[in-house]
């Protein structure tokens, strides 16, 4: 369970209010996407949940405990792939397990499980430079999963790949999530992506950063091509789109 209680963030030196007053509860194994215009505080919110920033007011709790730094209960995946270029796919995925002191055979078993889950078994011994952007991001997802966090925090993870790859990555992520449920908080600029993935879409607004609207996505999983083309999907997409777009017209 993630709880944000009146979270605010003011950046010095100009006292810029990046987040006004954000309150939100996210249940276990929920898939929540966060969408909103540039500068509305999405990354700030994510960094507070990751323990990389502290709120200036209010508090963030994970599992009922205030966040006071990064922890193995939260895996973070950024837009940049952040893989170690000198390590193979398997060694990258094993990295966090090695840090935790997991014995070699167990490390390998766990790494291979998640590498298979993201469909990269035949690339386990490859170096990152030989992989496409989409494949690298699948390695990052496997690596985050490997240390068994209960929460995955994903900041525009598919922002740097082409549109077709992006759709494939969304399907792949949902397939992984349906087999290994976790609480996911996923930031995106892409309204289609926000609706396709989520149980709930949190629409944020800027100046100050705040929650403008929360849209429940009552579409079943697995989310198929058929669902993406359904009138219900189009209606939800339209609702989220107007919540994002409408506010941008307001000066
Ligand atoms: N370290 C900082 N110091 C001062 N201002 C900051 C700092 N980090 C972020 N900001 C400001 O806070 C606001 C929110 O930034 P944030 O990166 O959280 O927004 P965002 O919604 O993720 O934007 P984008 O979608 O463009 O990535 C922005 O106006 C940004 O300029």
Image (tube, rainbow, N blue to C red):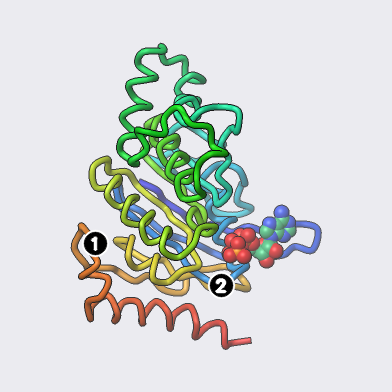
On the question of residue 105 being in view, the answer is: yes
* 98 lies left or right of 13: left
**Position in image of residue 87 (x %, y %):** 55, 27
Residue beneath disc 2: 37
State which quadrant residue 197 falls in: bottom left
Q: Residue at x 42, y 71 (%)?
A: 191
Image x and y of residue 70, in percent: 54, 36
The image shows residue 249 at horizontal and vertical percentages of 57, 88
Q: Is mark 2 within 8 Å of ligand 1?
A: yes
For marks 2 and 1, give the CA distance.
26 Å
Residue in front for this viewpoint, 84 or 52: 84
- Quarter of the image for residue 141 reads top left
Is the residue 111 above or below the residue 159 in the image? above
Which image quadrant is residue 57 in? bottom right
- In terms of depth relative to the viewer, which is nearer, 132 or 50? 132
Is label 2 in contact with label 1 (beta carbons under 8 Å)?
no
* Quadrant where ligand 1 appears: bottom right
Res 17 seen here? no
Nearer the observer, 126 or 139: 126
Disc 1, SS: loop
Q: Which residue is drawn at 44% across and 55% down?
A: 186
| Disc 2, SS | loop
Q: How crowded is mark 1: few (under 14 residues within 10 Å), some or many (20 or more)?
A: some
In the picture of the structure, the residue carrying the numbered disc 1 is 223
**Dot 2 surroundings within 10 Å: few (below 14), some, or many (20 or more)?**
some
Residue 65 in the figure: left or right of residue 225: right
* x and y percentages locating residue 48 in the rendered image: 56, 49
Residue 74: which numbered mark, if any?
none
Viewer-closest of 38 and 22:
38
Q: In this view, does 234 lie above or below 36?
A: below
Q: Looking at the rendering, in which quadrant would you find the C terminus?
A: bottom right
């Amino acid at each position: 369970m993630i709880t944000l209680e009146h979270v605010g963030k003011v950046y010095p030196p100009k006292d810029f209010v990046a987040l006004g007053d954000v309150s939100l509860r996210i249940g276990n194994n929920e898939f929540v996407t966060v969408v909103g215009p540039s500068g509305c505080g999405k990354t700030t919110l994510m960094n507070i949940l990751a323990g990389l920033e502290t709120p200036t007011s209010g508090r963030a709790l994970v599992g009922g405990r205030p966040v006071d730094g990064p922890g193995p209960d939260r895996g973070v995946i950024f837009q940049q792939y952040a893989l170690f270029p000198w390590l193979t796919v398997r060694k990258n995925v094993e990295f966090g397990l090695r840090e935790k002191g997991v014995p070699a055979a167990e490390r390998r078993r766990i790494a291979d499980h998640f590498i298979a889950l993201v469909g990269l078994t035949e690339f386990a011994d490859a170096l990152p430079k030989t992989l496409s952007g989409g494949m690298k991001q699948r390695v990052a997802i496997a690596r985050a999963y490997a240390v068994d966090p209960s929460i995955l925090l994903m900041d525009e993870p598919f922002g740097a790949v082409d549109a077709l790859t992006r759709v494939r990555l969304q399907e792949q992520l949902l397939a992984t999530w349906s087999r290994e449920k976790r609480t996911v908080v996923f930031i995106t600029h892409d309204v289609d992506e926000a609706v396709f993935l989520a149980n709930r879409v949190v629409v944020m607004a800027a100046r100050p950063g705040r929650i403008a609207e929360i849209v429940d996505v009552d579409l079943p999983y697995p989310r198929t091509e058929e669902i993406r083309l359904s009138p219900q999907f189009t209606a939800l997409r339209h609702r989220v789109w107007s919540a994002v777009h409408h506010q941008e017209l307001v000066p």
